[in-house]
Amino acid sequence: MSRAATLEIRRPYVIKLGGEVVGGPVGAAVAHDIAALVASGVGVVVVHGGGPQATALQQALGIEPTIVGGRRITDAATLDVMKMAVAGKVNVELCGQLMAAGARPVGLHGASSGAVRGVKRPPRVVSGGGPDPIDFGLVGDITGFNRELLDLLAFAGYVPVVACLAAAADGQVLNVNADIVANQLASALEAAALVLVTSAPGVLRDVKDPTSRLRTLTVAEARAAISDGTVTGGMIPKLEESMAALTDGRVGAIHIVGNVVAGDVGREIAEPGSVGTALFP
């Protein structure tokens, strides 16, 4: 059986990296594990953010970032920063780490033949943002993906590396939270698993205590953790998007991991909760 045929009969993995881990030892460790998964005949699609890099560039340019409920408000100047930092610096660095690990990455963004399609998000109320609707500016809601392009690459043993930028039908580029892209892409691809790699070792009862990691969470338990204040800040939208992906039944499992070394991603997939937090319906 050919490599492409082997990949086609398996559900792919989607792995998302936060910008804070790209370029460092965690990014290198994940790149190693991605290369190992692809070598075993598994299709892998990578999604990445770039929040810290975008914030650093904004500050260097004299632009003060505005974050509400863990989400970035995006005006025209901020969108230019996202293009430079996320689709530029972070995407290139992550592709470099994957190449060094022996994988064959292909950098993509929303305007890459509509790899990620979207429309401008209307004002809405968000968790952690107060009672009034928030206008996030040039931020997108996803309407679909170019499955043909992603399948063509992943089923041929390449690794699509997708920056968290969508494109509207008229070519307008839109900023999208990378967790939203990863969760909705995992659902669209009916992924065997989605792995969210962050700077935190998982969902913590106490953000100051890494040993308070919750090994497993159901959707109901995750909602309760948000409601009672156990989960705060950027982990709120991460869990909200993960719950939506699990509820539709198209994703096998979702894992939140951090501070990983080579081999940890594969171990977490095989033994849910062994490295990070595993989420189930």
Image: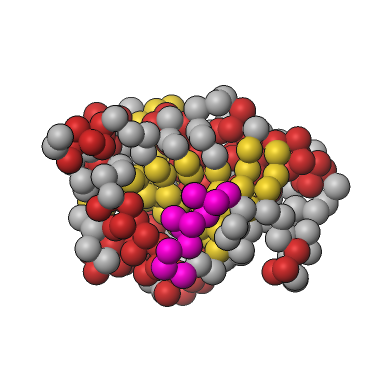
Q: Residue at x 58, y 60 (%)?
A: 275
Q: Is residue 242 left or right of residue 17?
A: right
**Please, is residue 65 above or below residue 148 in the view?**
below
Residue 151's spot in the image, x, y percent? 26, 34
Residue 127's spot in the image, x, y percent? 73, 42
Q: Residue furthest right?
A: 228
Q: Residue at x 30, y 42 (%)?
A: 43
Q: Is residue 19 left or right of residue 93?
A: right
Q: What range is drawn magenta here?
A: 261-272
Q: Quadrant of the C terminus?
A: top right
**Does residue 264 belong to the magenta stretch?**
yes
Q: Residue at x 31, y 57 (%)?
A: 36
- Relative to the observer, which residue lies in front, 71 or 45? 45
Residue 51's spot in the image, x, y percent? 50, 60
- Relative to the observer, which residue lies in front, 272 or 205? 272
**Does residue 161 belong to the magenta stretch?**
no
Q: Quadrant of the N terminus?
A: top left
- Residue 22 visible somewhere in the drawing: no
Q: Residue furthest left?
A: 2
Q: Is residue 246 left or right of residue 236?
A: left
Q: Residue furthest top?
A: 248
Q: Residue at x 59, y 39 (%)?
A: 241
- Relative to the observer, which residue lies in front, 136 or 146? 146
- Residue 155 visible somewhere in the drawing: yes
Residue 269's spot in the image, x, y percent? 49, 49
**Please, is residue 246 above or below residue 257 in the view?**
above
